[in-house]
Image: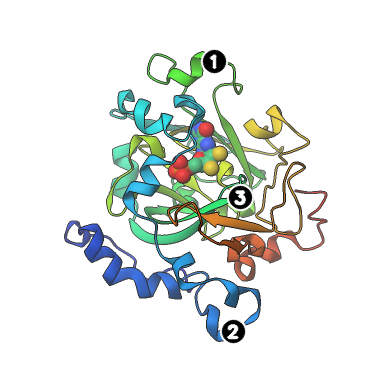
């Protein structure tokens, strides 16, 4: 498939950012959204700059991670305290082999690859991020998904001693998220363990975070410690906090506005204060790959 161009990442592939950009830029443009100019239509309106990876600096200093504070620069200031070794992920519920899976053991079993995905936040900004990681499906298969499973629930670490934001009731802690099983098993859905070939920075969700590129950024839950296979739709933090504004699906959709602002366009971070707004694409540009998951659903009701 077009978004996958390299199956393994070796130490020797971890390069300086400038080299990385030169080497990968063309591929990034060809992946996922690319071929914009060639096919015309709304995708043609996306300038090439809109598809270039953001700098490591942008990606690691402008974050949402409420466990470390609600400001965009709080995570980079406060997440250094987080201890990420040892780290285990409990996989339980409707699985054949429930248990605590050690992060290092998971990594040893997975094929780590690079994927450059557009990332669209509900606040109408976007980034392009070169993730390293593996398909969530492969991790779920370690535990063996049972036939009764229909949804996947995710949970972030709860450790207020290290996560200063958890001392305040801005959200119900721990942060939780959910996907339908077919969304979780989709090849675009990854567990990311790094950025730009480096281990995941704490502020981006070390050591392991979900990335679902056709959904708004808040679905991509960070620092995951628990994954539960269920037969019912699980609660999700933002839906619990404000059900009118945040639904379970949260697919990027320029036609369905957030109750307080339009979702038709976005501003790419890093372009400076006067950077042009660019049109937001259906399913964040991954429409061809994922729209069939929602056949027959009213996306304005299931937002
Ligand atoms: N995961 C946890 N545990 N806590 C959070 O506050 N914020 C979400 C998501 N995952 C969040 C989280 C939101 S709103 C966004 S936009 C993305 O993480 C931001 O990811 P980034 O900082 O790596 O860009």
Disc 3, SS: loop
Is 121 rendered above or below residue 187?
Answer: above
Disc 3 crowd rating (10 Å Cα; few below 14, some 14-19, many 20+) is some
- Residue 193 seen by the camera: no
Q: Position of residue 32 (x, y in %)?
A: 50, 69
What whole-number distance in Å separates the C-alpha atoms at marks 3 and 2?
Answer: 25 Å
Is 243 rendered above or below residue 24?
Answer: above
> Of callouts 2 and 1, which one flags the residue occurring earlier in the amino acid sequence?
2
- Residue for badge 1: 168
- Residue for badge 2: 39
Disc 1, SS: loop
Q: Position of residue 33 (x, y in %)?
A: 53, 70
What whole-number distance in Å separates the C-alpha atoms at marks 1 and 3?
Answer: 26 Å
Left/right placement of residue 12 relative to residue 42 reads left
Residue extending farthest to the left is 12
Residue 124 disc label: 3
Disc 2, SS: helix
Number of numbered labels in the structure image = 3
Left/right placement of residue 101 relative to residue 65 reads left
Dot in front, 3 or 2 = 3
Residue visible at 65% across and 79% down? 41
């Amino acid at each position: 498939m077009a978004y996958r161009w390299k199956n393994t990442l070796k130490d020797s592939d971890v390069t300086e950012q400038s080299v990385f950009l030169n080497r990968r830029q063309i591929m990034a443009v060809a992946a996922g959204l690319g071929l914009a100019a060639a096919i015309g239509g709304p995708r043609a309106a996306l300038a090439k700059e809109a598809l270039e990876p953001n700098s490591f600096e942008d990606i690691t200093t402008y974050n949402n991670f409420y466990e470390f504070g609600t400001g965009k620069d709080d995570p980079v200031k406060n997440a250094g305290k987080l201890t990420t070794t040892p780290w285990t992920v409990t996989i339980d519920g409707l699985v054949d082999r429930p248990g605590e899976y050690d992060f290092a053991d998971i990594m040893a079993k997975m094929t780590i690859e690079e994927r450059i995905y557009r990332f669209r936040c509900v606040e109408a900004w976007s980034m392009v991020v070169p993730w390293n990681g593996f398909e969530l499906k492969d991790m779920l298969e370690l535990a063996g998904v049972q036939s009764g499973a229909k949804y996947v629930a995710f949970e972030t670490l709860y450790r207020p001693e290290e996560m200063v934001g958890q001392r305040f009731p801005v959200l119900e802690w721990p942060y939780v998220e959910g996907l339908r099983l077919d969304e979780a098993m989709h090849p675009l859905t990854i567990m990311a363990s790094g950025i730009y070939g480096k281990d995941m920075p704490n502020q981006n969700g070390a050591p392991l975070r979900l990335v679902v590129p056709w959904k708004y950024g808040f679905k991509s839950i960070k620092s995951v410690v628990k994954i539960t296979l269920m037969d019912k739709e699980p609660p999700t933090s933002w839906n619990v906090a404000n059900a009118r504004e945040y639904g379970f699906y949260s697919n990027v959709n320029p036609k369905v506005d957030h109750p307080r602002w339009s979702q038709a366009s976005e501003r790419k971070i890093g372009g400076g204060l006067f950077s042009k707004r660019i049109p937001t694409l259906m399913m964040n540009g991954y429409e061809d790959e994922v729209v069939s998951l929602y056949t027959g659903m009213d996306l304005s009701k299931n937002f």
